[in-house]
Amino acid sequence: MTFTARPARLSTTHADFEAQFAARLHWSAETDGAIEQRVADILADVRKRGDAAVLEYTARFDGLAAAGMADLELTQADFKAAFDGLPAAQREALQAATRRVRSYHEAQKKAGGESWSYRDEDGTLLGQKVTPLDRVGIYVPGGKAAYPSSLIMNAVPAHVAGVQEIIMVVPTPVRGSVATGGSGASTSARGERNDLVLAAAYVAGVTRAFTIGGAQAVAALAYGTATVPKVDKITGPGNAFVASAKKRVFGTVGIDMIAGPSEILVLADGSTPAEWVAMDLFSQAEHDELAQSILLCPDAAYIDAVQREIDRLLPTMPRAAIIAKSLNDRGALIHTRSMEEACAISNRIAPEHLEVSSSEPHRWEPLLKHAGAIFLGAYTSESLGDYCAGPNHVLPTSGTARFSSPLGVYDFQKRSSLIEVSRAGAQSLGLIAAELAYGEGLQAHARAAELRLDEVPAMRGSQ
């Protein structure tokens, strides 16, 4: 079957640009009511029945018929065997990517993830104590897709932060089960395990792992069962059931984010080979039909060249059907008046991935305020960031880069304020605090401060 991809052609000079632009960006984040109710039921059931409920849902959705939770736990020996069984090139690639991701996050921790303090002029100590979370849960997709790179991006910053226990959940559904899009009739005592994912768990230092997925896995991590430890935070991507479950357990545990479809925006000045840009647009479109790929460029002839490359390259893509639907439904090639205008539009979009495909990327980078990750220069393909450049590939989507950040070491830490007031400091601070406390009508607050003054005044009445 032949597929055709025709992203919308827009121009900022057209009178209807704003309407067309808004229509192309629109993505409904509304949730399916049936999914929401099903997830709520699963969470409540796992919270009540623990392991028994997890076993039941794993059999129902993944076709994995386990006699007990021990049959669903992966061991360090499983990780090591998977790693040893990989071709040498894959082992080396996993190790190299992990080293680079670790190095970046170590630098991140040093820059802003360590405790600090100072003493002011009266000897009072003020500061911040940074401590790692005790235990985190990492959700790694399985079944239709397997992402060892995602495991590395979640586990490594947790390790660098100092987290002692990293609990991985990864579904290993039986072929033909509900989770793989089948009827659910197929059952087996062993699901389909992805050796690259297990090997990544070995390289990244996962502590424990269970072959469970869906809302039931999120519930087990959030509430704890007799077998699955309760965690402090859950990170990692998943389907609509996983996203809904994470949203519902937030508050009981922390979560990283609720992610929407993947996005790429390319700012191009026409200096990069059009073939490269077309393939970069494909790199996000191939994720799923809802992914969004946008090109902003002031050179109309170059946009034409990119479209020609899309036409030429699409038939060579194994995931051509997905790419075509994504580009046809949500893609856009936008002709701008200038690169400055392109940067302004990019800030409005606040994309997950932003490529500055220019001969002068550092000229435009200062104009860019909102993006999950910024890739500078023609040689910096977004795919390098996905796997091995070093920065985290778990990024804010759907415009949330306006107020949120990539997953990082800071997501696996918490901060406590440190305050040690000296005797001299208590004299000045006590007067300030008491004055404000009396003003708020909180006499006990005021008196607690006044009792530490060298000369204790009489307590005032209500103000």
Image (tube, rainbow, N blue to C red):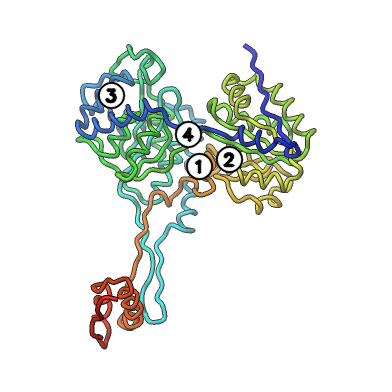
The image quadrant of residue 131 is bottom left
- The image shows residue 231, relative to residue 114, as above or below, that is above
The image quadrant of residue 246 is top left
The mark nearer the N terminus, 3 or 1, is 3
Say which residue label 1 marks: 395
Residue at 27%, 27% in the rendered image: 72
What's the amino acid at mark 1? Answer: Leu
Say which residue label 4 marks: 29
Crowd tier of the residue under label 3, counting other residues whose Cα lies within 10 Å: few below 14, some 14–19, many 20 or above? many
The mark nearer the N terminus, 3 or 4, is 4
Say which residue label 2 marks: 353
Report the Cα–Cα distance between label 2 and label 4: 19 Å
Say which residue label 3 marks: 57
Report the Cα–Cα distance between label 3 and label 4: 26 Å
Residues at marks 2 and 1 touching, judged by CB atoms closer than 8 Å: yes
> Could you tell whether 95 is left or right of 23 in the image?
left
Crowd tier of the residue under label 2, counting other residues whose Cα lies within 10 Å: few below 14, some 14–19, many 20 or above? many
